[in-house]
Image (spheres, grey):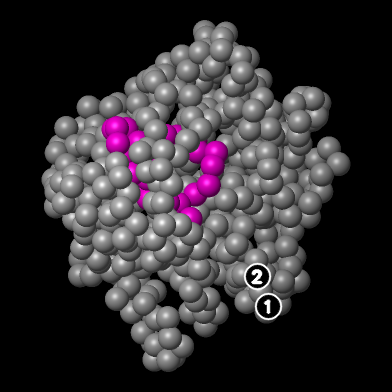
Amino acid sequence: MDEITTRLMEFVGDAGILENPKLDAPFSQGHNHIRPLQPSILVKPKNVDEIQRIVLWANETQTPLVPVSSGGPHFRGGTYPAVPEAIMVDLSGMNRILKIDRRNRLALIEPGVTYAELQPALRAEGLRMIAPLLPRINKSVIAGLLEREPVMSPRYQWNLLEPLRSLEIVWGNGDKFYSGSGTFRGEKDEDWQAGRVPVVGPGPAQLDFYKFVSAAQGSMGVVTWATVKCEVYPEKRKLYFVPSEKLEDLIDFTYKLLKFRFGDELFIVNNTCLANILASPMDEINLLKDKLPPWTVVVGISGGHILAEEKLAAQDADIHDIAQQHGLRMVTALQGVCGNEMVDIILQPSPNPYWKLRYKGGSQEIFFLTTLDKTPGFVTTMSSVANEGQYPIPDVGVYLQPVQQGVGCHCEFILPFDRANRAEVQKTQELFREASHRLFRQGAYFSRPYGIWADMVYNADARTMVVTQKIKDIFDPRHVMNPGKLCF
């Protein structure tokens, strides 16, 4: 170990090494049958050259590397070692916002930049970025985009990686690579003025290389910077709630909004999920949950710098008409929370405690892709499995997020549990496994296969597994990048 430490110090210096770091277990319990392995060393590189030297050294010595850029708590086990003697590559120190360009509506950032850091910086330039619902305050923007976390604005999402653009990647074999137009890094103002801007995501040529590191859990390489597409910050905003007793009554209404590209923010939540967003701690959540409608569409509209009031008024009238056509009503407040307050809540990172942990301190997620019209069937299945496992159905949070302009839907079930209660932890683990298998058989598409989902997905599709392994052999021939994940 002394020899390894000495060698790594040559790359990053004494301050960039931590021996025998202690990592907490993931907050989610169902993916891990045993406690995750602890890394032997944590190394904090400061730039791409140091990362490249670390990866080349790992290839020489066949040392497993596990890249991580977000702060804890971690939920899904994707950034925890699956093999012994692994080295954590902590990218949180690479947290520079290299460029914000309003003309091209782009931000060039390093992997350690969090939502809490990027959003205020963009706001100062009159820009914003479409973001997930209440990300952790220390969540890496690049990590969230690479892992395809769903964003609240399907109208701006042209593919599941939106708003990610060009990347700088150090592949598992140590090669440095630029995806899309990333070879134009554009750190100098004259580059941007001359049009040398890393704005294109796919490519070079016909291949979308940036997809190879998407949802790969760090098993292909390390992304060392990325460009992110931004939108102009709107001058005016409004947010409405559309409540309903039944989820089925909201489906056609939501599809109609998606058809006309209404809603800067558009998603559906049940009362449990909405109460977790709006309240804390457990007693307040329980009180609010009982008062909220069973299901609610949250729809936000905005007006830009040109005719902002007129745009808001037109959208307001049209959405009201669509709601009436479907026998629904739009309201500006729910249980004392007005739309303006809700906007302020959901457009910021989640304050601590993280919103999924507010009810009982622990939380297990089950999420997958489907279509919006099929979500009532999955909700019924989840309720049935919870009932069989004697898990309280009212505790199950449901978050439905249309993605890619409504082509698909991110369906998520949130299962809170008390981490200090061994029986409750075990019950949640069993529910997670049984529900995952039953939902998968029903047609749930686990596009981000963490933990036990990987076996389900790849065992059902041998051809995809073979192709994925071939891609791994090309970009990481010695399999040093986060071994043990996906089908590796």
Mark in the foreground, 1 or 2: 2
Seen in the picture, residue 27 relative to 180 is either above or below; the reply is above
Q: Which residue, as the protein is rendered here, is positioned at the far right?
A: 336
Q: Which mark is residue 106?
A: none
The residue that label 1 is drawn on is 305
Give the percent coordinates (x, y) of residue 255: 54, 46
The image quarter containing residue 165 is bottom left
The answer to if 75 sits in the magenta stretch is yes
| Label 1: element kind | loop
Give the percent coordinates (x, y) of residue 27: 53, 30
Seen in the picture, residue 189 relative to 366 is either above or below; the reply is below
* Residue drawn where x is 57% and y is 28% of the image: 363
Q: Which residue, as the protein is rendered here, is positioned at the far front?
A: 2
Seen in the picture, residue 248 relative to 237 is either above or below; the reply is above
User: Is the C terminus in the top left, top right, bottom left or bottom right quadrant?
Assistant: top left
| Label 2: element kind | helix
The residue that label 2 is drawn on is 123
